[in-house]
């Protein structure tokens, strides 16, 4: 297996063969996770610390389950209650934790770039679980595995990413990954929710769902990330749903076998019709959650192997 990275900070640093290596290994974990006995021992003896400076339901649970299934000692730091509230900087907290000899540090932080900075200060492998509006690499990897399994390939697909692109790290990491794998990407949303200079990403931009969804293989919906908005980006939720919410009529323009994706948390009736989200013939939203655990197990295994190899080199 050729995977030479010390950290997983973003999709930006990965080559197409790194992505394939992670997804192939994750397939083994999908199989393991469907068995009654789900344990492996590849992380036995290693310590994994999850530091979530932002709320998270599925990502934190997924990393915790992944670490435990691989045999690591997993600790979830309650960052709300930590010394950060007493004025300690992110770096001081990281150095304190580093002195306890963790092996894997999983970090989510509201500021873009915070996880990269932290990775420069510690001796362990760092996994970015989402930094501001910058990157969320494991989400893009789990989305890629979900697409590859549903469509039988991960190249030359027409993929629409719809909604609040400007504030979404999920969109950014997906644009990078799906672009590296040579797919055609369309971004659909109101101009107020498109990032500046989006054209440099090699994507097509639409502000009209009817046009943008024509003949796509994959429809990826995103939440309006209100916590990152400072002002009125949309007229009203009703109006937004009318123009950009995914419903049967809009989906009918995509390919007949197009799949529906959403990273969660989902706002039913705002960006997506609830019945459509639950339609097991179209929606792969629960598959995404399942693939999330497998992809995180695979990445942690690959990073841990490199970490252990680097320690024997320097011992
Ligand atoms: C996403 C996130 O936190 O960036 N959620 C997730 O990790 N599944 C998307 C979101 O919050 O809307």
Image (cartoon, grey):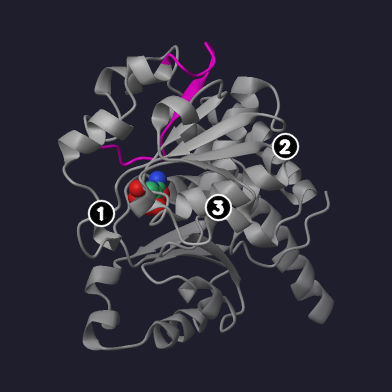
Q: Nearer the viewer, residue 7 or 196?
A: 196
Q: Pick the quarter of the image with the C terminus.
A: bottom right
Helix, strand or loop status at disc 3? helix
Q: Is residue 150 magenta?
A: no
Is 268 placed above or below 164 here?
Answer: above
Q: Earlier in the sequence, mark 2 or mark 3?
A: 2
Q: How far separated are the C-alphas under marks 2 and 3?
A: 19 Å
Kindly check if marks 3 and 1 are in contact, taking CB atoms under 8 A apart as contact: no
Q: Nearer the viewer, mark 2 or mark 3?
A: 3
Q: Which residue is mark 1?
A: 233
Quadrant in the rendering for residue 189 = top left
Q: Does dot 1 land on a helix, a strand or a loop?
A: loop
Name which residue lies at 38% across and 20% down. Answer: 250
State the residue position of label 2. 24
In this orientation, which residue lies closer to the viewer: 244 or 178? 244
| Mark 2 surroundings within 10 Å by alpha-carbon count, few (fewer than 14), some (14 through 19), many (20 or more) | some
Q: Residue at x 26, y 88 (%)?
A: 87
Q: Which residue is mark 3?
A: 173
* Magenta region, residue range: 252-267
Instruction: Residue 216: give x, y in percent of width and height.
Output: 55, 24
Residue 65 seen: yes
> Is 305 drawn above or below residue 36 in the view shown?
below
Say if mark 2 contacts mark 3, CB within 8 Å.
no
Q: Residue at x 66, y 29 (%)?
A: 157
- Residue 206: image x %, image y %? 47, 39
**Picture layout, residue 121 above or below residue 10:** below
Q: Magenta stretch: dominant SS?
A: loop
């Amino acid at each position: 297996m050729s995977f030479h990275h010390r950290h997983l900070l973003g999709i930006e640093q990965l080559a197409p063969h790194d992505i394939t290596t992670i997804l192939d290994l994750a397939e083994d974990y999908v199989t393991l996770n469907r068995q009654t006995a789900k344990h492996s021992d590849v992380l036995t003896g290693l310590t994994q610390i999850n530091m979530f400076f932002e709320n998270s339901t599925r990502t934190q649970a997924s990393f915790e389950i992944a670490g435990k299934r691989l045999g690591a000692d997993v600790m979830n730091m309650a960052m709300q209650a930590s010394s950060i509230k007493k004025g300690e900087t992110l770096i001081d907290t990281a150095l304190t934790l580093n002195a306890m000899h963790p092996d894997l540090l999983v970090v989510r932080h509201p500021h873009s770039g915070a996880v990269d900075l932290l990775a420069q200060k510690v001796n362990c492998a760092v996994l970015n679980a989402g930094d501001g509006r910058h990157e969320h690499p494991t989400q893009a990897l789990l989305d890629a595995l979900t697409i590859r399994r549903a469509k039988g390939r991960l190249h030359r697909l027409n993929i629409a990413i719809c909604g609040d692109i400007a504030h979404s790290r999920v969109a950014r990491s997906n644009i990078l990954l799906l672009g590296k794998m040579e797919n055609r990407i369309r971004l659909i949303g109101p101009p107020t929710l498109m990032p500046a200079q989006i054209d440099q990403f090699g994507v097509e931009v639409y502000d009209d769902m009817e046009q943008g969804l024509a003949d796509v293989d994959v429809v990826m919906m995103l939440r309006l990330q209100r916590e990152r908005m400072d002002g009125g980006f949309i007229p009203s939720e009703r109006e937004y749903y009318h123009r950009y919410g995914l419903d049967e009529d809009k989906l009918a323009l995509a390919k007949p076998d197009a799949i529906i994706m959403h990273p969660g948390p989902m706002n039913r009736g705002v960006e997506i019709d609830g019945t459509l989200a639950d339609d097991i013939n179209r929606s792969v939203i629960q598959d995404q959650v399942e693939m999330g655990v497998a992809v995180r197990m695979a990445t942690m295994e690959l990073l841990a192997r490199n970490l252990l190899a680097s320690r024997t080199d320097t011992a």
